[in-house]
Image: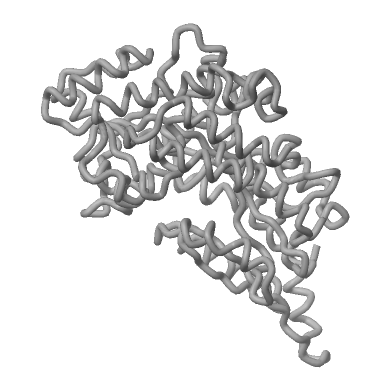
Amino acid sequence: MKRFALAAMLSVAAILPAAAQETVDWMHISSIPEEVALMEAAVAEYEAANPDVKINMQFLENEAFKAKLTTLLQSDAAPDIFYSWGGGVLTEQAAAGVLRPVEDLVDPAVAEAIGSGGMSAFTRDGHVYGLAQQVSEVVLWYNKALFEQAGVDPASLETWDGFLAAVQTFKDAGITPLAVGAKDKWPAHFWWSKLVVRLAGQDAFDAARMGENGGFAAEPFVKAGEMFLQLAELEPFQEGFLAASYGDASGYFGDGKAAMHLMGDWDYGAMKDNSANKLGIPDDQLGFLPFPTIEGGAGDPTDTLGGINGWLFHKNAPDAAVDFVEWYTSAEVASRFGNAGFFIPIAKGAADGMTNPFKVQIAQSINAAHWHSIFFDQELGPQIGGVVNDISAELAGNALSAEEAAELVEEAAADLR
């Protein structure tokens, strides 16, 4: 590998003509200043070891990234490296021919460190299009002080009935039970998806994708909508939730104005960054719970919803892009982000030094999961995933029947079968 060749290069620099510097455009969606500072430090370190490569960091906010990426990848301004949640979106990008297969470039030791699960998440039809960096899980974050104020025992939320009872208790105490950023829709889709995970389980979900047993119009998916409406009828969300973005809802929870927030593990940092004082809920007042279990549901109680996220390579990406991402996703570098609590790194050994108790516990939860389902709006691809997001936001607002919601998802899926 060339990245550690700096000393040797310096020794001959005086007698060789200056080499042209290659620029690698790297598009990310990280917005937390402390995390971005770590990224910038990593880039500076890599560039110092590889003076012939310039890493050009480019930022797009999450929603803008999703909205613009498809067009961007077909333009001359396409980044060489860009963020990915994998899933069906990656499948469509590979089919569209905008990605570069890199299996011939990836060091076998790098692939071994990432593991078979991580590598398969970024492989389609035998071609490796990217490298996984992190895993994540959606959990029910909660504010211990508000639970105590309302007299709610967190253990009572183990079941769906107990959860609904707690929501009503918070309402009666004048406390907003839940924050959600329904304007962005994907935060609302976590509710429908988690209910599907509990009610349908992996086998029924996979069968629905194939159009078997009624597809997504089958009973577990209708039931998920019914239970989502059951929650919505309690009016559990903050005032104005339909016009609130993820950042708004994250800040609302971080400011201590809602008892719970169903969100990914990244909300630990985002909640603080989005709060008014940038401190958020103190660690000793913060907790998280697994999603309530549902009696009679086919899902395994250990099943989780989350992501295996990483970086993809555009079809015109140079070899230097692969070299940089191999280094950036390595345990050496990824552990810095894990130790700082920004994400749970996937490279073997990278999470061993994590001290954030929330991240450590979530990592253990993912490792113990029977099925770690990928975010449905990513796993099912943009067409179906977009419909899942749409119906979820409408269910949160009690503006759609459960049957209509399930049928709309099935119609979108049927169009692609």
Instruction: Specify whether residue 364 is in view.
Output: no
- Residue 372 % position (x, y): 60, 28
Q: As rendered, which of 178 and 226 lies closer to the eye? A: 226
Quarter of the picture containing the C terminus is: top right
Judged left or right of residue 339, residue 188 is: left
Give the total of numbered labels. Answer: 0
Vertical relation: 301 (above or below) 43:
above
- Residue 71 % position (x, y): 62, 66
Q: Specify the quadrant of the image occupied by residue 178.
A: top left
- Residue 88 % position (x, y): 67, 43
Q: Specify the quadrant of the image occupied by residue 311.
A: bottom right
Judged left or right of residue 200, residue 36 is: left
Q: Residue at x 64, y 21 (%)?
A: 214
Vertical relation: 338 (above or below) 197:
below
Q: Which residue is drawn at 30% across and 53% down?
A: 274
Instruction: Specify whether residue 18 is in view.
Output: yes
Quarter of the picture containing the N terminus is: bottom right
Vertical relation: 417 (above or below) 227:
below
Q: As rendered, which of 9 and 174 lies closer to the eye? A: 174
Q: Residue at x 78, y 41 (%)?
A: 112
The colour scheme is one colour
- Residue 338 % position (x, y): 52, 45
Q: As rendered, which of 268 and 389 lies closer to the eye? A: 389
